[in-house]
Amino acid sequence: MSEYTHDDADRSAEAAGNENGTEDTVLFTDFNLDGRVLAALTDVGYEKPSPIQAATIPVLLEGRDVVGLAQTGTGKTAAFAVPALSRMAELAEANGPTRNTQVLVLAPTRELALQVAEAFSSYAKHLEDFTVLPVYGGSPYGPQLAGLRRGAQVVVGTPGRVIDHIEKGSLDLSELQYVVLDEADEMLRMGFAEEVDKILEATPEEKQVALFSATMPSSIRRIAKQYLNNPAEISVKSKTTTGANTRQRYLQVMGPHKLDAMTRILEAEDFDGIIAFVRTKMATEDLADKLKSRGYRAAAINGDIPQQQRERTVEALRDGKIDILVATDVAARGLDVERITLVVNYDIPHDTESYVHRIGRTGRAGRSGDAILFMTPREKYLLRAIEKATRQPVEQMHLPSAETINNLRLSKFADKITETLASEDVSLFRDLIANYEQEHDVPAAEIAAALAVMAQGGRPLLVQDLPQAPKGQRERAGGGRDAMNSRGPSRALTEGNATYRIAVGRRHRVMPGSIVGAIANEGGLSSAQIGGIDIRSDHSLVELPADLSPEQLRALSKTRIGGELIQLELDSGRKPRRDREDGGYRQDRGGFRGGFRNDRGDRDRGFRSDRGDRGERGYRGDRPERGDRSESGFGGRGMGARKPRHGRG
Ligand code: ADP
Ligand code: MG
């Protein structure tokens, strides 16, 4: 992604992408396209060509080979499909109709092949007697053979299956005019180099070749050199493409807390469709199951799931029958589902290219999207690489607090009451309640409260803290947890522990590490004995064993951090008061350098004490606007009293 060139094509691409552009705005009608193809573009609702389209369509129409470099979601499919169709329409006009295969598109995965085939058909909608046939592995040969026998002017296939058909003699390439390698970098990365070579060898000498890719590694250069004839290299700079309309954030979270983090985000964020990326096939099933058991409509796709089922799952997402797709990189490659408004990198990708591809699943062609990256502290180096590759800062976000979640739940609950009153006939129950009120002399509000408890069916309405991790994870997070872990988002106080107060806080610029270091050294504790740390403005709360010996207490009362006596003492439960004196909740949640932000405060204070001023506080400070990061760095500083983006709560 560092190879974007600054050539003429670039300039024209930028001009075409210029929203305010008046005279430089390029329209599809500016190209010499077949009228029927133009009509189809109007039908699908494309107003004007995307930058890569504006730059490549005229060159491809001239018949020149093209190497097109642009990020995902920039409209590469139409960039090659539209000129191909237009040229074929012309040929048919000149030479009469044919059912020979004239166009072959190679795509790395079945999903992608299907998607390209679908797009092709939509652009070919007004061409008569025209067939686009997808052929891919993992599905029966029968229908594909029948389709090929009937004849398809366009074949879109995965390399392996295309070779099979060439070898079987079912795919005749002798009349081929045009070959496209789509997502060429991915195709090669998936190990299809040999197949690609073989297929290109099997095509006629005279043909046009277009190669599209998000990146230009040397393997692609090699293919381009070997099989393309003096290609025009057209690149669209990444800053005008991927991510420009995708807001990227990261959340520091320890592995065992990811599920809880995910469900909190699901509760607090506005979203339509979501795709969550995990590293392994097993993890897709695992996460999908857990989300389902928490009431979300989720499904997994991975390479082991039969093709047809995968297609059905993607379709279900498209149709709104499910909301969350949990996927591996390979299974989700190239997916274009308009509903996806949020990409969650549940497991951080291994490389920046995967990241770019992942977030390319949202914010498609001008729509806006959100991407959230879960990152453990150890993975921080990858974040920098990602920022470099996408040329965009990734903002730090913090977990929606228990308070945010609770406010949302309360207002949802109230909405349900309103809805029910508006839509249901409540007369039977009204009489019943009226009778009860009289007979038992209990105020209606009390009765309503009892009914609300019944309606909750035993589920707590409010979270006290992070939702409990599932059992297995809790166990892992317990006892043997490491020092990092114990400073992660909060859990209930570990048994045998107590909350201590130390007289150093943010004002003294303490960091969790220095607290752990000082207490462990001076108090003779192992770092595993030190639990959650909550740094407040002028003091901090630390979870330590309840039974510290007098010696330990003495040593710790004399301990200094940054020159300040820490004056360790058992926290007396005056916390809520003190928080108020400190300026409240707000400041305490603000800046916790380097993450490890925790929600301890919520547990300690409980929901009760915070409820009063929720309207004013809302969910604040946790979502700096994009620009802030450059000033505040990664430290999570500088989070003033800003309103949330999707103002809620
Ligand atoms: P890429 O192959 O570069 O990842 P796609 O070809 O899949 O991108 O296109 C991404 C999305 O943008 C698709 O939903 C497509 O329909 C849409 N799209 C493509 N070209 C245009 C255009 N000129 N105007 C509006 N939307 C477009
Ligand atoms: Mg594509």
Image (cartoon, grey):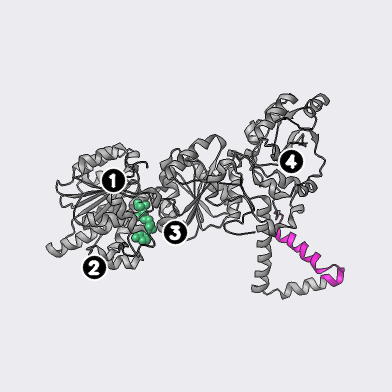
The location of residue 427, given as percent across then percent down, is 72, 76
The answer to which image quadrant residue 364 occupies is bottom left
Which residue bears the numbered disc 3? Answer: 367
Per the image, label 4 sits on a secondary structure element best described as: loop
Which residue bears the numbered disc 2? Answer: 35
Mark nearer the viewer, 3 or 1: 3
> Is label 4 within 8 A of ligand 1 (CB to nearest ligand atom)?
no
In the image, 496 versus 245, the foreground residue is 245
Per the image, label 2 sits on a secondary structure element best described as: helix
State whether the magenta stretch is mostly helix, strand or loop. Answer: helix
Report the Cα–Cα distance between label 4 and label 1: 66 Å
Few, some or many residues within 10 Å of mark 2 (<14, 14–19, 20+): some
Among numbered discs 3 and 2, the one appearing first in the sequence = 2
Few, some or many residues within 10 Å of mark 1 (<14, 14–19, 20+): some
Q: Which residues are magenta?
A: 436-459
Among numbered discs 2 and 1, the one appearing first in the sequence = 2
Report the Cα–Cα distance between label 2 and label 1: 34 Å
Tell whether position 456 is magenta. yes
Report the Cα–Cα distance between label 3 and label 2: 28 Å
Pointer 2 with pointer 1, Cβ within 8 A = no
Among numbered discs 2 and 4, the one appearing first in the sequence = 2
The location of residue 327, given as percent across then percent down, is 47, 46
> At x 57% / y 36%, what residue is drawn?
377
Quarter of the image where the N terminus is located: top left
What's the amino acid at mark 1?
A: Arg
The answer to which image quadrant residue 452 occupies is bottom right
Q: Above or below — where is 205 with respect to 338? A: above
Which residue bears the numbered disc 4? Answer: 538
Report the Cα–Cα distance between label 3 and label 4: 44 Å
